[in-house]
Amino acid sequence: MPPGSRPAPDLPEPLAPLVDAHTHLDACGATDAASVKEIVDRAESVGVGRVVTIADDLAAAQFAVDAAHWDERVFAAVALHPTRANALDDAARAEIERLARDPRVVAVGETGMDYYWPGKLDGCAEVEEQVEAFRWHIDLAKRLRKPLMIHNRDADHDLLTVLLDEGAPSAVIFHCFSSDANMANACVEEGYILSFSGSVSFRNARELHEAAKLVPDDQILVETDAPFLTPHPFRGAPNEPYCLPYTVRALAALRDQDPTELAQTVTANAERVYRLPF
């Protein structure tokens, strides 16, 4: 069901402090400073005081950096999405690196590997192109000493192999973690950070539920990945950063934690991993 086919969720009961570790403000409808402010104001009203907006192509990368300069509550991450890795020519590499050096850019991402879309999506990068681009983004993150934000879809083993082969940056974030407990354990052992989205609230996501339970407190983040993956019971509705408290409460219930304490934990983690100003 595409986002937006149901009415937008009501504002949740506030839960603070929170950082949306991965969202797409442009895909949520933001086009300028005023619309960015409107979305972030709505999020801040329920405790989500800061957001990291993510790029998946060059236009989105420029927008993300602009948005981070328009509003002090917004930070950016830039990269080419794995499905667009075939666009990573020399000019694109130069532009991504230029943008990634901006002080408002707190991560290189989202990059990684996606085995779901090749053959299904017109123009999607092939696996070999994704691997080459992933290796380049890993190197960029290490050179700039910024966290690497990973997109992983159906590529667990091969993605970990590339990370091991290249040597991971000091901070690695698996955005929208959606794998099972075995993958979670493998990531935890390497010191990687797992970020959970609204999918962790889905009733049929049993393997993900088990994975979410075993992540140590200091290796966990929360995100919306808005406008996608709106948390239960609002699947199919448009997602925005203001919806994050729904996901945090669902995650806290799975982990048998107090939601306020979990909010404080994940916010401290975001501040540490992204080096956000306090």
Image (cartoon, grey):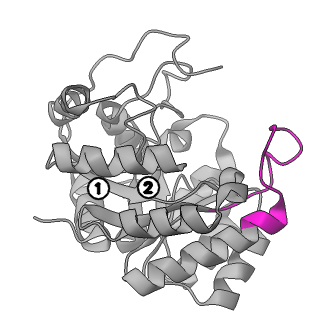
Give the residue pinned by disc 1.
262
Give the residue pinned by disc 2.
255
In the image, the segment drawn in magenta is 112-130
The chief SS type of the magenta part is loop
At numbered mark 1, what does the secondary structure look like: helix, strand or loop?
Answer: helix
Q: Tell whether 278 sits left or right of 191.
A: left
Q: Quick one: 122 or 7, which is closer to the camera?
A: 122
Q: Amino acid at mark 1?
A: Leu
Q: CA distance from mark 1 to mark 2?
A: 9 Å
Binning the other alpha carbons within 10 Å of mark 2 as few (below 14), some (14 to 19) or many (20 upward) gives some
Please say if the residues under marks 1 and 2 sit with CB atoms less than 8 Å apart: yes
Binning the other alpha carbons within 10 Å of mark 1 as few (below 14), some (14 to 19) or many (20 upward) gives many
Quarter assignment of residue 15 = top left
Figure quadrant of the C terminus: bottom left
Residue at horizontal 55 percent and vertical 21 percent from the top? 3
In the displayed structure, 127 sits above or below 169; it is: above
Q: Is residue 179 visible?
A: no
Q: Quick one: 242 or 73, which is closer to the camera?
A: 73
Q: Tell whether 232 sits left or right of 2.
A: left
Q: Position of residue 53 (x, y in %)?
A: 36, 47
Q: Amino acid at mark 2?
A: Arg
At numbered mark 2, what does the secondary structure look like: helix, strand or loop?
Answer: helix
